Amino acid sequence: MEHNVDVVIIGAGSAGLYALSQVIRKGKSYLIVQNGELGTTCSRVGCMPSKALIQVAEDFHRRKALEREGIEGSEQLSVDKEEVMEFVRELRDMFVERVFASNDKRLKDHIMNGQAEFIKPGQLRVGEDTVNFSSVVITSGTTPVIPQAWEVFSGRVITTDTLFELNELPESVAVIGLGVIGLEIGQALARLDVDVTGIDMAEQIGGIEDPEIHLSVIETLAREFPLWRGQAVEVTEEDGGLRVTAGENSVRVDSLLLSMGRRPNVAGMKLENLGIELNPQGVPLYNPNTMQCGDQPVFIAGDVNGDRAVLHEAGDEGRIAGINAASDSLQAYKRKTPLAITFTDPNICTVGRPWSELDQQQTVIGQIKMAPVGRALIMTKNRGLIRIYGDKKTGKLLGATLFCVNGEHLAHLMAWCIQQDLTVFDLLRMPFYHPAIEEALQAALRDMASQVEDNPGGVPDLEKL
């Protein structure tokens, strides 16, 4: 059967749905091609179920502070891992259902299930159907990486795509890959009385570039579960479980939790038939301000492009791609200040310009250790460090890396201020309430202000009439 539409969107995940909203707004005809289950990565296997598991783990972990506060009986608390997973799935299913409910009318009669395969520019095939289109938006998402050599252990290999389907958590697990997901889930499982070993073949974990923050993270998280870094990993079967070895370290575990990254879902699409340039991973090169691939009416958005794999960026990319795919002329859009949050306890956050892109000779760093911060002490969450980067001459805010309680909120404040091109002095003239975690940010800003060359003098917190 042959179909003719204005816009084809490949993938009904977050980016695809945001693109769809713009295509509908422009009044264009459309078709969605979905290869696999509906329900976004965020709602089904990513942001939402992981945060539910993290919250349960944090609630149970809090019992360790109760006796110190004079609250007795915490030793009687226990965790039912089967009930935990049932609770997480209930929340997960609710989030997925919300996605379905809000998009049911828009998807009905406009969705085709199967693998999209490009025949030539302006034409693709899905099974026995041929689709002619004016423009296409590729939002096909990603799939967890599983090394081929470890596929033989499939019965004992867990990924984030399968973790939340477990009826019960394993007694012991090796988390291989200590990026954002590995750290978040590794800490959560350890707090739910799973025997966790964290392993990464690189020395650097969590995508953290700032060396002082990285050291603080290592020191803090290693109190909860072992962190093996910088060694190749070998896995063999042993006594009904798995023996995991990295250098001189070795442990027997029930399962592997692989968080070694995700590969873009582009295999089988035959993107080479579109006449656009591809990177070594087979993903189209694109303009991040228009989301266009080359000079063709081809657009790409979301995790599949391998750039900013977080939902708010997927949303922006989907909107940009949808607008341009449904328009007669291209519109370029300014991208927002980079913001990334790892929901460990404490949070790990990066904002604005990363450490690797700073001119160290022209940058001042304001910092504060969380240990003496009053509000953090009261909360018994006073581990970590805040580091803020600014221009040495003017004090203009450039970026920040935070490892602290409520970092998710401070990071948003910093991102908003950086996007507004504010200086350290602009922020210090804002109100800071006592006692609040924001006071830690205030202390780091004062430290930065003292190093800025164009210091206006006087008390930086006050502005003269």
Image (cartoon, rainbow, N blue to C red):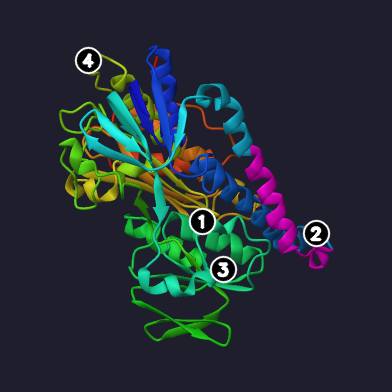
* Mark 4 or mark 3: whose residue is earlier in sequence: 3
Q: Which mark is residue 329?
A: 4
Residue 412 falls left or right of residue 293:
right
- How far apart are labels 2 and 4 at the CA level? 66 Å
* Mark 3 or mark 2: whose residue is earlier in sequence: 2
User: Can you tell which of label 1 and label 3 is closer to the viewer?
Assistant: 1
Q: Judge the density around disc 1: few (<14), some (14-19), many (≥20) Cα neighbours within 10 Å.
A: many
Nearer to me, 445 or 317: 317
Q: Residue 251's x, y, as percent?
A: 51, 82
Q: Which residue is mark 2?
A: 70
Q: Which residue is mark 3?
A: 224
Which residue type carries mark 1?
Answer: Thr
- In reply to whether residue 304 is colored magenta, the answer given is no
Task: Identify the secondary structure beneath mark 2.
Answer: loop
- How far apart are labels 3 and 2 at the CA level? 23 Å
Identify the magenta region: 73-94
- How far apart are labels 1 and 4 at the CA level? 40 Å
User: Can you tell which of label 4 and label 3 is closer to the viewer?
Assistant: 4
Q: Residue 92's x, y, as percent?
A: 63, 44
